[in-house]
Image: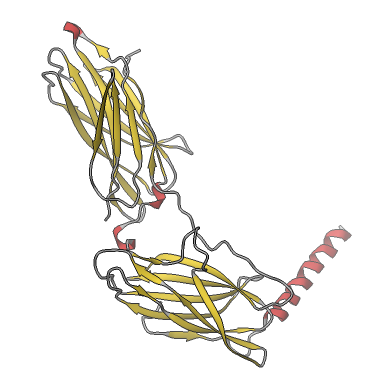
Amino acid sequence: MKRIGYESRTNTGGRNRHHRDGVPARRRPHSRCNRGDGHRGRSGQLLQIEDVAIEPGSVSGGTATLGVETRLEHRGGPAGNVTVLVRAIHADSGLVETTTEREMPTIEGEREASVTQNVSIERRGDYRIETVVFRDGERIAEGAKEVNGVGTLKPAYAETNVAFHWQDSTSEFPPVEYSVADAGNKRTTLNVSTYLTNQGDDSSDNVRIVFTARQADTNIVADRVSVSVGEIDAGRTASPSATLSVADDYNYYLDAVLWKDGVVVESARSAANLDPTERLSVNETNREIDLSVSDFSGDNDPDSAKETTTIENDEGQPGFTALAGLVALLVAGALARRNRE
């Protein structure tokens, strides 16, 4: 699984430190920690939160593990009986979802000491990660960070370097293209294709693409085809295609769904306008908000099939016109009963 790197900056009395973990990442959240006045105990001892860094760990279908590293700055005499508590609070419900506590060994010398704790949370929504430091049972420092976009973290089984080539807000091309291959007898055959690019450094796993034509007004599946793509070499683009047969004079959404080992990993949508009286448009880009971590705010003051298959409509099934007429009659009957009441 790809790990998400982080960047942290610390401002300390005119000095500027810059730490960076060098892990390549598709997304790079930023975090900053502004140190407060700290807490001075007996013998002029100083113990405060210098920085808190959060990075993702293991991810499953329902949960994600976050590694929370707390760095404490120590000055003065030895600091013993220090405990660091970390808890994850769901932003929507305000409920504490998980809590972990770790006791630190005695901190001696003028240095920074760190402790890393793992918190497991549901892979949905946003969270507030709070860090509290205790010494001798007394709260001496606390702070928090907000973590957004946890749902964008993908489990290992859904990770792939293969992506739709034109799935970008700046692209002038639709992610799914089509042309009319044949027309007649109130049916139109569409040649549907897309472009898949392997953005990784190694050959991809075996993947397949499923093309679906959905009638725009009713969302009924008019035709569906599964195409085996196989492996795609690193840095190469594949162009799978298939034919779909649909009824004339309707507009359709053309969906392309990418599968890997029985799991949906990507999807794209375009529009096919076959109705001369009405034009269908579709937002052809799916934008996800990446995982992001807020600035640290704290207080240091104690105060389907693999082979190509085509699913055709049975000739005996009612067409879209008959279905639309039936829906109209049902709606009219319901309105009439409502007016009589």
Residue 251 x %, y %: 65, 74
Q: How many discs mark residues in the rendered view?
A: 0
Percent coordinates x, y for residue 207 in the rendering = 34, 73
Classify 282 as above or below 51.
below
Q: Quadrant of the N terminus?
A: bottom left
Q: Tell me residue 135's x, y (percent).
A: 22, 18
Q: Residue at x 21, y 14 (%)?
A: 46
Asked if 106 appears above or below 327 in the picture, the reply is above
Residue at 63% x, 66% y: name it. 281
Would you say 103 lies left or right of 26 here? left
Instruction: Work out whether 1 lies above or below 274.
Output: above
Task: Check the image and name the residue furthest to the bottom.
Answer: 185
Quarter location, residue 329? bottom right
Q: Position of residue 62 (x, y in %)?
A: 36, 53
The single residue placed furthest to the right in the displayed view is 340
The way the protein has been coloured in the rendering is: secondary structure
Residue drawn at (59%, 64%) of the image: 282
Foreground of the two, 72 or 61: 72
The C terminus - image quarter: bottom right
Q: In the picture provided, is 317 more to the left or to the right than 306?
A: right
Q: Which quadrant of the structure image shows residue 21?
A: top left
Residue ranking furthest to the top? 43
